[in-house]
Image (tube, rainbow, N blue to C red):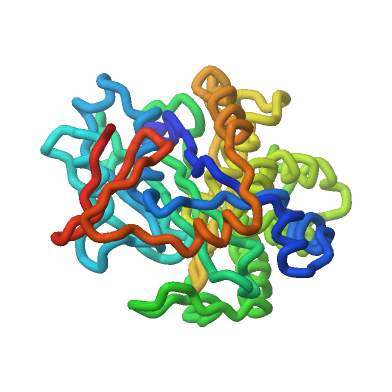
Amino acid sequence: MTIGIDKINFFVPPHFLPMTTLAKGRNEDPQKYLVGIGQDNMAVTEKTQDIITLGANASKKVLENEDLNNLAMIIFATESSTDESKAAAISLHSLLKLPPFVRAIEVKEACYSGTAALMWAKDYIAAHPGKKVLVVTADIARYGLNSGGEVTQGAGSVAMLITENPRILAIESDEVTLTEDIYDFWRPTGENYPRVDGPLSNSTYIEFFGKVFTEYGQKTKKTFQDFTALLFHLPYTKMGKKALLSQLPAEEERLLEKYTLSAQYTRQVGNLYTGSLYLGLISLLDNDSSLKAGDTLGLFSYGSGAVGEFFSGKLVSGFEKQLDTAYHQELLANRKELTMESYEKMFTETLVEEKTYEDPTPFSIKKLAGGIRYYQD
């Protein structure tokens, strides 16, 4: 039985801030952001958007009526949860008007939890042939105005339908996972912004890639030459490249070319946390016309705290027919550019009790005394 990604889609907010604007506003050299960090734009959310509205907009394009009869579970991966107890998957289930007999859960381990959800979905389907699982990753990466991490903020969601006989990527059962208790990045309960040890986080990420890829090679006997492309969790586009260069033989220049294609969407959006690795997958599939069925992709997932995992997948015959490239590129092209003033205002605005706001996306939210309520226009 082959199991993997049958459909995949992303959604980002309709506003962005250019890095050149942010650099000017913070009295920094723009090249520090454009080249040093590797970012061009940052996705910015309005007060009416949260992980559930982002996730709903990503999910609605991967769920068709034919999928609903066999949909068994929603796994929502996030580190931007709206509730300490209730799963975001339940609100998403309601918003999308899904069948009642569907398990809905939320998982957490920083940016790694999107991969944890994918592996859980794969194992579930192996034990329940014919069933389908919706994996949703959604986050709003915020570090605060004038903070050291401001340039690596972002927001968005990636939704994937995991099935038997997938039409995009068949996931291999060859994963290697590493866990260590490291305080490189964490956000204690009740705090709005994470605490970050930037140098430690960067070095841990690179170290984890080296460790898991070495262990993977010993386990599978595979080398860099066995992969058509390598994909990385990208908190910013230079991070994955640093890890790749730390291990990559000089003759494997082709993998750096593929890496650049996989980072194109991240350059325009910023950090998606749990969805970052899978945004890179979409970017590669949308922008590399040389890919073909049977190509092997390697994927490195990382979540601070820390968990790292390397696994592989093979592209399926006809995968290009399942892509929604035109939609993705139109979504990015049609966003509205923010000024520094409008960005800072949007960043600090919050919902007011019992008042509903207009939302430019298909889904909106309103906050009532009993909590957050979501509705579809």
Depth check, front residue: 301 or 190: 190
Which image quarter: residue 350? bottom left
Please state if 280 lies on the left or on the right of 289 as rendered.
left
On screen, 176 above or below 65? below
Above or below, comparing residue 57 to residue 23 in the picture: above
Residue at 62% across, 48% down: 338
Q: Which of 47 and 304 is in front in this view?
A: 47
At a point 60% along the width and 47% down the height, the residue shown is 16
Q: Which residue lies furthest to the right in this view?
A: 250
Q: Residue shown at 33%/38% (left/top)?
A: 363
Residue 239 picture location, percent across and down: 69, 61
Image quarter in which the C terminus is found? top left
Where is residue 117? Give x, y as percent.
37, 51
Asked if one can make out residue 273 in the rendered structure from this viewpoint, the answer is yes
- State whether residue 176 appears in this view: no
134 relative position to 32: left or right: left
Would residue 81 be found to the left or right of residue 33 on screen?
left
Residue 141 position, x and y percent, is 51, 61
Question: Which of the two residues, 304 or 48, is positioned nearer the viewer here?
Answer: 48
Q: In which quarter of the image is the N terminus?
A: top left
Image point 21% across, 38% down: which residue? 72
What count of labels does the image hold? 0
Q: Provide residue 81's location: percent of width, then percent of height.
A: 34, 61
Residue at the extreme left: 100
